[in-house]
């Protein structure tokens, strides 16, 4: 029995030393080394793949966002909204969005409010960005005071009329253009004369409605005034002025109420002239009030007011449409 055991041990040693099948480690050691080298290969391959991906991303830079949109709920609830255009690529503007909000806020300078960008989109022109923003109360449940709204409305009108510019960081945004009011509580009225004073005796004041926007009328203002002057047959001492109102508080929405007032430098024979002008309006009503239909569309809702009749005109008194009382011959 002992002899047989020794022979088995000797055979095992011979097998281990067999040059045809050499074994330098025991089976358990060999298995552990195989697992170790296998894990190392996996780690090496993973690291190599990660390095390769990094190199590929370096060769192809990450694309910047092409547009930005705020939450829909913000767009729907913001009551004071405006628009302008920047001569900068949208990707560059998006990267400086916070700076843009601060610049707009600094330009408006209204307490207890903040400026929020609603959207940034590439405009039809390449390398230009359309910017929409809102002025919101702070805190959110706060209501902007009436006086502050009046101040903000005045700022918006001045920006629209190009009588004032926002103080933006020039290196980041350049000069803003094409300012428009999108929405404003209580409506908005634009005086095309701007800050130029109007003085004299008011002879007549009447309103009518056009189905185009304030912005479109502003672009055709000279044509509007010349056609009104022609149909009213003004005397040399008379001038015609207009105010444009949109009840939604938008310069791009329609309809628009056009408030027309004729001012005279003399006050003689006021009643006779008033009657004559009223008759002229009645006669020209069937002729679209003398306005080119292809340019201004159909004139609607002609109404007449005498609440300032014969008074020395103060521009501040006619910043909003007058209370309408239908002139008997126009009803």
Image (spheres, rainbow, N blue to C red):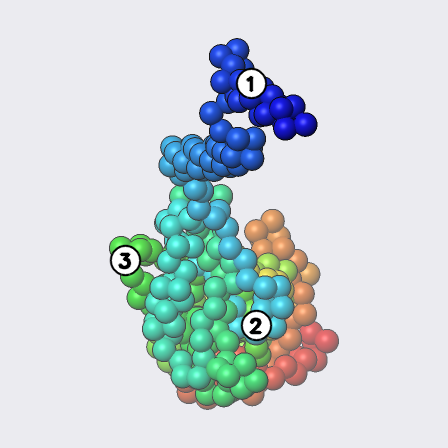
Label 2 or label 1, whichever lies nearer to me, is 1
Q: Nearer the viewer, residue 107 or 301?
A: 107
The mark nearer the N terminus, 3 or 1, is 1
Q: Nearer the viewer, residue 97 or 300?
A: 97
Examine the rendering and report whether any part of residue 217 can be seen.
no
Q: Residue at position x 33%, y 55% from top?
A: 173
Horizontal and vertical percent position of residue 267: 42, 84
Question: Marks 2 and 1, Cα distance to the nearest angstrom?
Answer: 89 Å
Q: Nearer the viewer, residue 283 or 90?
A: 90
Q: Identify the mark at residue 284; answer none if there is no mark.
A: none
Q: Does 259 sit above or below residue 120?
A: below
Question: Marks 3 and 2, Cα distance to the nearest angstrom?
Answer: 27 Å
* Local secondary structure at mark 2: loop
Q: Which residue is mark 3?
A: 170
Q: Which residue is mark 1?
A: 15
Horizontal and vertical percent position of residue 10: 55, 21
Q: Is residue 71 left or right of residue 218?
A: right
Most distant residue in the right direction: 331
Q: Which residue is mark 2?
A: 78
Residue 167 is drawn in which quadrant? bottom left
The mark nearer the N terminus, 3 or 2, is 2
* Local secondary structure at mark 3: helix
Q: Are marks 3 and 1 in contact (CB under 8 Å)?
A: no
């Amino acid at each position: 029995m002992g002899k047989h055991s020794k022979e088995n041990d000797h055979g095992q040693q011979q097998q281990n030393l067999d040059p045809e099948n050499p074994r330098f480690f025991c089976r358990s050691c060999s298995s552990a080394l195989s697992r170790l080298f296998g894990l190392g290969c996996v780690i090496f391959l993973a690291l190599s793949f990660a390095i390769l991906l990094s190199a590929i991303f370096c060769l192809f830079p990450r694309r910047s966002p092409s547009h930005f949109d705020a939450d829909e709920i913000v767009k729907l609830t913001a009551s004071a909204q405006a628009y302008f255009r920047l001569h900068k690529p949208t990707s560059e503007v998006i990267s400086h969005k916070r700076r843009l909000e601060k610049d707009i806020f600094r330009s408006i300078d209204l307490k207890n409010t903040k400026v929020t960008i609603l959207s940034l989109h590439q405009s039809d022109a390449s390398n230009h960005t359309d910017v929409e923003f809102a002025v919101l109360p702070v805190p959110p449940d706060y209501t902007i005071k009436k006086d502050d709204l009046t101040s903000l409305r005045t700022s918006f009108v001045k920006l629209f009329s190009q009588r004032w510019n926002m103080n933006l960081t020039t290196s980041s945004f350049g000069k803003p253009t094409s300012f428009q009011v999108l929405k404003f509580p209580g409506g908005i009225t634009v005086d095309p004369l701007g800050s130029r004073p109007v003085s004299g005796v008011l002879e007549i004041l009447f309103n009518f409605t056009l189905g185009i926007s304030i912005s479109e009328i502003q672009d055709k203002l000279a044509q509007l005034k010349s056609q009104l002057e022609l149909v009213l047959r003004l005397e040399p001492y008379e001038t015609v002025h207009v105010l444009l109102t949109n009840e939604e508080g938008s310069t791009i929405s329609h309809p628009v109420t056009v408030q027309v007032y004729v001012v005279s430098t003399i006050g003689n024979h006021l009643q006779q002239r008033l009657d004559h002008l009223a008759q002229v309006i009645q006669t020209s009503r069937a002729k679209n009030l003398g306005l080119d239909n292809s340019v201004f569309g159909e004139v609607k809702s002609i109404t007449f007011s005498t609440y300032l009749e014969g008074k020395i005109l103060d521009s501040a008194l006619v910043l909003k449409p007058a209370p309408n009382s239908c002139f008997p011959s126009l009803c």
